[in-house]
Amino acid sequence: MIRIEKLRKEYKGLTAVKELDLQLEAGDIFGFIGPNGAGKTTTIKMLATLLKPSSGKAYIDGVDVVANPEAVRERIGYMPAFFGIYDDMRVWEYLDFFASAYRLPRNERPRIIDDVLNLTDLIGKKDNYVEELSTGMKQRLCLAKTLIHDPKVLLLDEPASGLDPRARIEIKELFKELKAMGKTIIISSHILPELADFCNKVGIIERGEMLISGDVQEIMSQVSGGKTLEIRILGDLEHAAETTHSLPGVRAVRTLDSKLHVDFNGDLEAQADLNRLLVEKGLRILSFTEQQTDLEDIFMKVTKGLVQ
Amino acid sequence: MPSLSENPVLLREVRSRLRWRRVSKQTLLRGGSVVAVLALLCYARLITLINRGRPDDASTLWWVIAYGLLALIVLLAPALAATAISQEREQQTWEGLVVTRLTPMQILAGKWTARQMLLGITLVILAPLMIAVAIKGHLPFVQGLLTLVILVMTSGFYSAMGMFCSYVARRTAAATATALLISVFLCLGTLLVNEIFFQLMADRDYTQYTYYHQLTPILWLNPFLVMIDLQEIYNTSSYTTPSYMVDQWTFSRQMMLTAYPALTAIFTALMFTFMTARYRKPSRER
């Protein structure tokens, strides 16, 4: 559905995006992760036909974004990181304006508007003026506008930025519904927990370079290279660390907050054996848990250059 | 492709200008009725006065209205149009508009047409008065028609110029200031440049150029001069000057009356072409 080949964008004296490659299938939800200024917005804008790449190719649903921007615009819904809304219109007028701009048939517009308002939970605000809406509602209205022409691909640039926790949860639920609808979504964010729940693919970008991309689970195992075990020990922590390090499957041991953090290669059997061996070595174990690796860990490791 | 009457940008611009639509219908009806009655009374009285007056007074009033409208256009049209694009960028609504299926020409045409409303509404309001004045003042039909053509062309050109400034400038304030400066230059600066030119030429052979001064191309875009020429072109009977000079003046004025609409149309088209060509490709990086 989305294919990016060696995409590059250069500004005067700055390379914003370097030889980016990416391939997404229909229904993929791609989390585009990176610090501010990493090149996420530039990439999304190139896909949205708003910026011309310096070199490389990008295709959406098989259509070249540079050669045929009009055809691409039919297929995409783009929600910018910073967006304005025409405050002096009613909610339905605002959506009707965009429905008309996307050339939806006049007789179908009322139904479509009701549908997207229902989806975004704004149906109760249909006759309100836009300026009367809260920030979270405006965000949802912008998303409703993005969905009005039922695009196959959604390009969402920092869609939850500036929202309070409740609005953030609400918009997250909305993304899950879009996922269920089978949309292909690229969603950029530097707030990682908001992506972890619904992305099946992620890409981490820093200084314009895609450091790593692919299936979330694959990346997790690739980056962490195994499991991290968290062991709480009663007694001398340094001695415990030395003892643990010598055991099979243990790659590294760190002491943190009176606990051992053990990088470990092995399955559940090996994990149980490790526990047994530690006890046999005379260590007094209070707790033995497997630490969940999340996107935040991956991001920190990748962007620190721990994984190349 | 939707027609102009279905252009969503035009409809939105028109809606946003009708800010009084938030007032309740009752208040609107009451206020509107009072204003309409007062306006009709004033209008009726004015038309009665015109009918009782001399034809010369009516003719003078025609030109007062024409110059008044022209002044209104050259001051307001660029200022209003200068908000068209830069304000959308400032409000961060431009990208949302550009990624829709609207063509650049539809967006620009919608915005441009909405900005012709000022002239349109004013002309509709003044139409009965202007008709009464034209009839009473025995205004030649062609002269009246050309007056309207010049007003319309001027409005179109100055709006396009304001929009062009809005497209080029990053900030609305800068766009407005630039558009007004250009407007002032075209109305006053061209006269100054023309005068400097003829002062320099005067040392050589002043008389050779005196009657041709209106052929100086820079003056062809001055809306007030073209209106003066239109007013004077039918007043040849009152000249006391030799007929060959009158012929030269008439030729010069006909030249102005042809050049002005042609140039404004060409420049308007050029500005639209530039603006649409610039963002037909995905290269907008502002």
Image (cartoon, coloured by chain):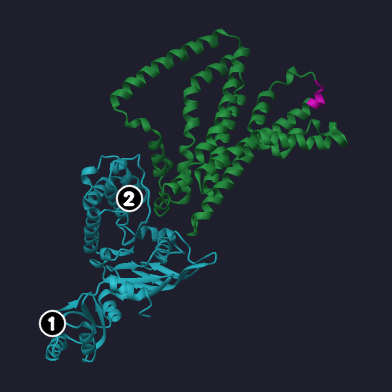
Other-residue count near label 1 (Cα within 10 Å), few / some / many at <14 / 14–19 / ≥20: some
Residue at mark 1 to residue at mark 2: CA–CA distance = 66 Å
Q: Colour of chain B?
A: green
The residue under label 2 is which amino acid type?
Answer: Leu
Callout 2: 10 Å neighbours few (<14), some, many (20+)?
some
Q: Quadrant of the N terminus of chain A?
A: bottom left
Q: Nearer the viewer, mark 1 or mark 2?
A: 1
Residue A295 lies left or right of residue B244; in this view the side is left
Q: Secondary structure at mark 1?
A: strand
In this picture, which residue range is highlighted in magenta?
B241-245
Q: What hue does chain A carry in this figure?
A: cyan
Residue that protrudes farthest toward the top in the picture: B52
Tell me which chain the residue with mark 2 is part of. A
In the image, A132 versus B3, the foreground residue is A132
Tally of marks? 2
- Of mark 1 and mark 2, the one earlier in the sequence is 2
Q: Amino acid at mark 1?
A: Ile
Residue A146 placed where, x, y %? 32, 54
Q: Residue at x 54, y 49 (%)?
A: B168
Q: Going 34% across and 71% down the picture, which residue do you hit?
A: A203
**Residue under numbered circle 1:** A285
Q: Is residue B244 within the magenta segment? A: yes
The quadrant of the image that shows the C terminus of chain A is bottom left
Q: Which residue is mark 2?
A: A104
Answer above or below: position of B133 versus A287: above
Return the residue nearer the eye: B265 or A124: A124
Q: Main secondary structure of the magenta part?
A: helix
